[in-house]
Image (spheres, helix red, strand yellow):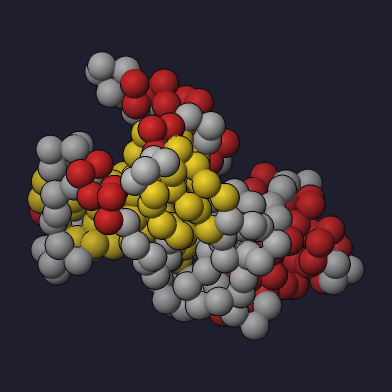
Amino acid sequence: MLNFTHLRINYIYMTVNQKIEELIIRECKGNKSEFARRVGVSPTVIENIVGSRKGKPSFEVLSKILGSDLSVDPSWLFDLDANNSVVHDSVFAIDTEFVDDEVEVFTNSNGNKFYLYPNNRIEIEVIKVPFPAYASYIECYQDEMNSFNGFDTIRFKADHIAKGNYICFVSEGDSMWNEGGYDTPGGSEILAREIGRQFWDNLHSTKYGLIFVTKTGIMHKDIGGYNKETGMFSLCSRNPEHKPFDYPANDVYQIFNVIKRSF
């Protein structure tokens, strides 16, 4: 079985997008909603990939396509050769230029690993927490040992080695999607940095929104304000079909600032 955990997306998107579009035509007679249903993602995710936006598909979406009942040849989708290596100029690239002892690894106080390559490329490795895995995450969060070994990890390109607690969340639903350039569809892989509780009184709107880890679940929202008298956050969505609501700050465990998204 092929292992795509360490494949990294570069910036040539069209090839894989066109192949997914061809799959929709071939397997579902051009019905994008039917394709999304069979793959197990929302129609919004598929529309983002094959529509005018041409967003890059995440590893999770590609894995779901390969794991679905669709007739998909991984070597065709990923441009693999007979040795299961990615061919030149493919949508995906594997770092084979450096051996392990040439890569320096730094771990910050929160356990995030940074990989520094000889060409000065830096990657950060973080745990990946799907929104539906909320209960498991909270159990680990409240554990004194604070062990997240049960979660998968993922790497993102980083600008520098940094302090702070970084996590990748996998979003769910369309509340933060309104087809804007900074909006986020469900199924996106979101790199986020924790905001210290001492800064919660002065939260403000950000480019990509905030992640709230609460007693009732994980939410991706914009902050509409904080009422010190009532102790309530006002949380907003970018999809106009989702109305703003208040949520008690005392029921929030963590807040993260979204740094980048992949979808």
Q: Position of residue 166 (x, y in %)?
A: 28, 47
- Residue 184 appears in the figure: yes
The x, y position of residue 187, in whole percent, is 58, 53
Image point (34%, 26%), residue name = 141
Q: Is residue 233 above or below residue 238?
A: above
Work out whether 228 lies above or below 185. Answer: above
Residue 150's quadrant in the figure? top left
Looking at the image, which residue sits at the far right? 29
Residue at 50% across, 53% down: 235
Side (left or right) of 62 relative to 125: right
Residue at left offset 65%, top offset 83%: 52
- Height in image: 73 above or below 147? below
In the image, residue 39 lies at what x, y percent? 72, 51
Which quadrant of the figure contains the N terminus?
Answer: top right
> Which residue does the image show at 38% across and 65% down from the upper left?
205
Residue 19 located left or right of residue 254? right
Asked if residue 225 lies left or right of residue 105, the reply is right
- Please indicate, yes or no, whether residue 129 appears anywhere in the rendered image: no
- Residue 126: where, in percent of width, then height? 31, 44
Location of residue 34 with respect to 166 vertically, above or below: below
Q: Residue furthest bottom?
A: 52
